[in-house]
Amino acid sequence: VSYHEIFRDMGARLVGAQPGEVVMMNSLTVNLHLMMVSFYRPEGGRTKILIEDDAFPSDSYAVASQLRLHGLDPAEHLIRLEPRAGERTLHTEDVCAAIADQRDQLALVLLPGVNYLTGQVFDIQRITAAARDAGVTIGWDLAHAAGNIPMRLHDWGADFACWCSYKYLNAGPGAVAGCFVPA
């Protein structure tokens, strides 16, 4: 019953957060929906969500459902970043440039800390800074990053992040997931 309190400090250390910025609850996709309901605020011309083209399938579905929840067509309001021709990974400068170029249309950027297909580690600090500079909300799916790479979410200024514990944290199927929201 009190696992959200028992795992708070451990979860915070895992992602480089303050204890009051992390809660362990639900599943990854449920938490992503909760975070997007809270942080995705389409207004005026800022309605679009930017993700990577080969985002984890459940992330793609969650983002599309959030767009539909707001009466928006994913075909028009979902921007998918693709690698350069002949390459499999995204360049950090291309991600940052896309955020800057689309700043007037973006309401949310949602990217992984580590790509599940290629193993690419995203420069969370630099991409978060680019989103913050553009005035765009940025969230991170850390399903393949939590327990896998060092992070300092509090210091880097992410707006939110979610992760599961059944992959690199070895908790097994059905294990509790985590959320980060800065204090």
Image (cartoon, rainbow, N blue to C red):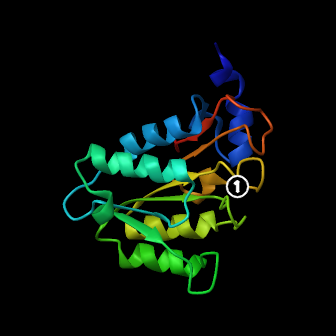
Most extreme residue toward the right is 170
Evaluate whether residue 43 shows in this view. yes
Residue at x 77% of width, y 47% of height:
147
Is 120 on the left-hand or right-hand side of 41? right
Is 119 on the left-hand or right-hand side of 27? right
Going by the numbered disc 1, the residue's amino acid type is: Met
Q: Nearer the viewer, residue 87 or 162?
A: 87
Q: Please, what secondary structure does the residue beneath circle 1 have? A: loop
Name which quarter of the figure residue 180 lies in. top right
Q: Disc 1 designates what residue?
A: 151
Most extreme residue toward the top is 1
Name which quarter of the figure residue 21 lies in. top right
* Whether residue 147 is situated above or below residue 174 in the rendered picture: below
Count residues near mark 1 (Cα–Cα under 10 Å), then give few for <14, some for 14-19, many for 20+.
many
* Whether residue 39 is situated above or below residue 55 in the rendered picture: above
Residue at x 73% of width, y 37% of height:
166
What percent of the width, then of the height, locates residue 151?
70, 55
What percent of the width, then of the height, locates residue 10?
74, 34
What percent of the width, then of the height, locates residue 138?
47, 57
Q: Nearer the viewer, residue 130 or 1?
A: 1
* Whether residue 146 is situated above or below residue 29 in the rendered picture: below
